[in-house]
Image (cartoon, helix red, strand yellow):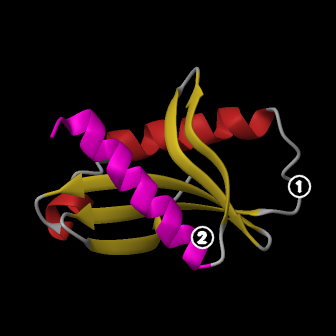
C-alpha cells in the first residue's frame, strides 16, 4: 500500500474515532498557504486541530511529530482562524497515532501554540 493511501485510511479511521467521541468534524485535509491540517474538529467550545500519524508502532507514530512540524501546524491553524470567528473558543492541538491493523491513541494537547 502506498504511503498516500495509508494516510487516507488513517485519516478515515481518525474521523470515525473522533465522531464516536462526540466531536464534529469541520474540515479534513485543510490546506492553507502555510501548510496542511489533517483534521479540524469541534467538541463543545473546544476547537481541535489534529495531526494524524501512522507508523509501524504507536510510539514511532508519536515520535514522528517534530517540533518543526508542530510549528507548521500552529501557523496553518492561525491562518485558518484568521478568516473565521472563533471568539470564545478554546483551541487545542492533538495527535492521533495509528498502528495498523488497528491500534489508535489520541493525545490531547500534544503541543501548544
Looking at the picture, does residue 70 appear above or below residue 98? above
Residue drawn at (25%, 45%) of the image = 6
Of 52 and 102, the residue lying toward us: 102
Which image quarter is the N terminus in? top left
In terms of sequence position, does the residue under pointer 2 or pointer 1 come before the other? 2
Of 92 and 113, the residue lying toward us: 92
Q: Is residue 94 visible?
A: no
Quarter location, residue 84? top right
Quarter location, residue 31? top right
Of 54 and 107, the residue lying toward us: 54
* Apparent side of residue 1 relative to residue 108 in the rendered image (left or right): left
Q: Which residue is mark 2?
A: 19
- Within 10 Å of the Cα at label 1, are there few (<14), some (14-19), or many (20+) other Cα atoms? few
Q: Which residue is mark 1?
A: 87
Q: Label 1, secondary structure: give it.
A: loop
- Within 10 Å of the Cα at label 2, are there few (<14), some (14-19), or many (20+) other Cα atoms? some
Looking at the picture, does residue 7 appear above or below residue 98? above
Q: Residue furthest left?
A: 56
Region of the chain picked out in magenta, as a range: 1-21
Residue drawn at (52%, 59%) of the image = 112
Residue drawn at (34%, 54%) of the image = 10
Q: Are marks 2 and 1 in contact (CB under 8 Å)?
A: no
Q: Residue furthest top?
A: 33
Residue 16 highlighted magenta (yes or no): yes
Q: Position of residue 51 (x, y in %)?
A: 43, 52
Q: Is residue 18 visible?
A: yes
Amino acid at each position: 500500500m502506498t504511503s498516500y493511501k495509508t494516510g487516507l485510511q488513517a485519516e478515515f479511521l481518525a474521523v470515525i474515532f473522533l465522531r464516536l467521541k462526540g466531536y464534529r468534524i469541520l474540515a479534513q485535509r485543510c490546506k492553507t498557504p502555510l501548510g496542511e491540517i489533517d483534521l479540524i474538529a469541534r467538541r463543545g467550545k473546544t476547537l481541535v486541530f489534529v495531526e494524524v500519524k501512522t507508523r509501524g508502532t504507536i510510539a514511532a507514530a508519536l515520535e514522528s511529530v517534530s517540533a518543526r512540524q508542530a510549528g507548521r501546524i500552529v501557523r496553518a491553524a492561525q491562518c485558518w482562524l484568521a478568516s473565521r470567528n472563533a471568539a470564545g473558543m478554546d483551541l487545542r492541538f492533538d495527535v492521533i497515532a495509528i498502528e495498523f491493523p488497528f491500534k489508535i491513541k489520541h493525545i490531547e494537547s500534544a503541543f501548544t501554540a
